[in-house]
Structure formats: C-alpha cells, structure tokens
Image (cartoon, rainbow, N blue to C red):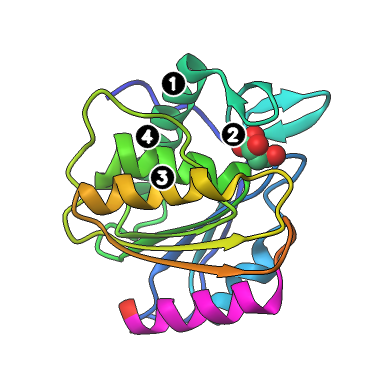
Amino acid sequence: MASTPDFIHRFVPGNDAAAPVLLLLHGTGGNENDLIPLGTALREGAPLLSPRGRTLENGMPRFFRRLAEGVFDEEDLIKRTHELADFVASARLHYQFQRRKLVAAGYSNGANIAASMLLLRPEVLDGAILFRAMLPLVPKQVADVAGMPVFLSGGRADPIIPPESTDKLAQLLQAAGASVELVWSSAGHRLTTFDIEGSKRWLKERFP
Ligand code: MLT
C-alpha cells in the first residue's frame, strides 16, 4: 500500500450503531463541510467521514485534475483514487470502524472519484450512492465488484454530465457484477428531493 496522505476531513461519529459509515465526497469547489447535511438526511445518526479533495482548480477543491470540463487527467485520477482509498482504509483504523459497512455518497466530481474507486479499489467500499456521475475512466481490468450495491441518480437536463456517460458507467459496473439501480429525473446538475428521497430509500433497503 502506498503511504497514506493526509486529507483535511471531518468525522462525525454518529449514534446509530446499525448504520453504515457514509463517506461523503463533495463536488468541484466544495469542502468537507458541504455534504454533512446530506449525510444526515440520508441516514440520521450514521457516522460521517467527509474528506476535502486535494486538487485545486482556480482555488476550488476537487478530487482529481481535469483538462477541460468532462475531460479528465487519467494519470492524476488513478493516483488520486488510490490516495483516497488509502485514506479510507487508514480512517477505518484510526476511527475504529473496521467492522462497519462503509458506503460512499458522492456528488458530481465526488461521485466520479467514488466511481473510480469502485472500478479500481472496490475493497474499501461496501456500496455507493452516485449523484450526477459519469464514466471516469475505462480501466484495463475492472476489479471484482460482484454483488456491490450501487445507486446512481442522474438528471436528464444536466448540462455537465452527459446521460450516455452515466449509462455507460452503469453498464460497466453491471457487467462487472455490481447490483446497480439507476434512476433519472428531469433535474439539472443540482440535487433535488427526488435524489435525496430515492437514495435514502435505497440505503434503508440495502443497509437496514
Ligand atoms: C468532474 O470534473 O468530475 C465533472 O465534470 C463534474 C464536475 O464539474 O465536477
């Protein structure tokens, strides 16, 4: 394992012993505070682990570099995916939740790095909620994601995430054995109550 980099992050211990830990991954320009309310809305009392992306684009935190909108620096993406996966593994030990399930909940850029972790380092996750995600890369070899529960929520009017890229991600994960639920609304890039209610229901069903 590569040496573990530090991520600025927040950890909220929670008080629901049955709930999975939620790994909250913000969008471009966000930070470790942004998705705390979302995490609480998804499952009240769940422990929340919320890192800040370590790449800056014009001062805006991201989880990996991009060359243009929707065009990713693949080398950086791969490197950052491993860094984040190593951080998750070390946070499990540090905060002593080794035995808990851990579900990523990512939005936009955060959903894309979560998707990349599913493709390259799925062993650090037990499931993922991906809001406005696209196919971040096509790995040479997809890791084993047999049975991995994944919830994808896309917006048909999203000007940033091409729906066909979300479809491709769903297909790739499904072909690799993941248990994928893909839902669409007429929304744009911003999240709506449809996204929250759908993912909350899915989380309760998959991680009761
Ligand atoms: C990305 O760069 O990950 C996507 O284009 C979404 C975003 O704008 O962050």
Q: Residue at x 20, y 47 (%)?
A: 176
Q: Residue at x 72, y 46 (%)?
A: 31
As shown in the figure, which amino acid type bears the numbered disc 1? Lys
Q: Which mark is residue 63?
A: 2
Asked if the residue under mark 4 is in contact with the one under mark 3, i.e. CB atoms within 8 Å, the reply is no
* Left or right: 81 as drawn, with respect to 14: left
Mark earlier in primary sequence (3, 1): 1
Q: Which mark is residue 14?
A: none
Give the x, y percent position of residue 94: 39, 48
Q: Which mark is residue 168?
A: 3
Quadrant of the image for the N terminus? Answer: top left
Sort mark 3 into few (<14), some (14-19) or many (20+) by Cα contacts within 10 Å.
some
Q: Residue at x 62, y 48 (%)?
A: 108
As shown in the figure, which amino acid type bears the numbered disc 2? Phe
Ligand 1 is found in which quarter of the picture?
top right
Q: Which residue is mark 1?
A: 79
Write the start and end of the magenta stretch as one range: 192-205
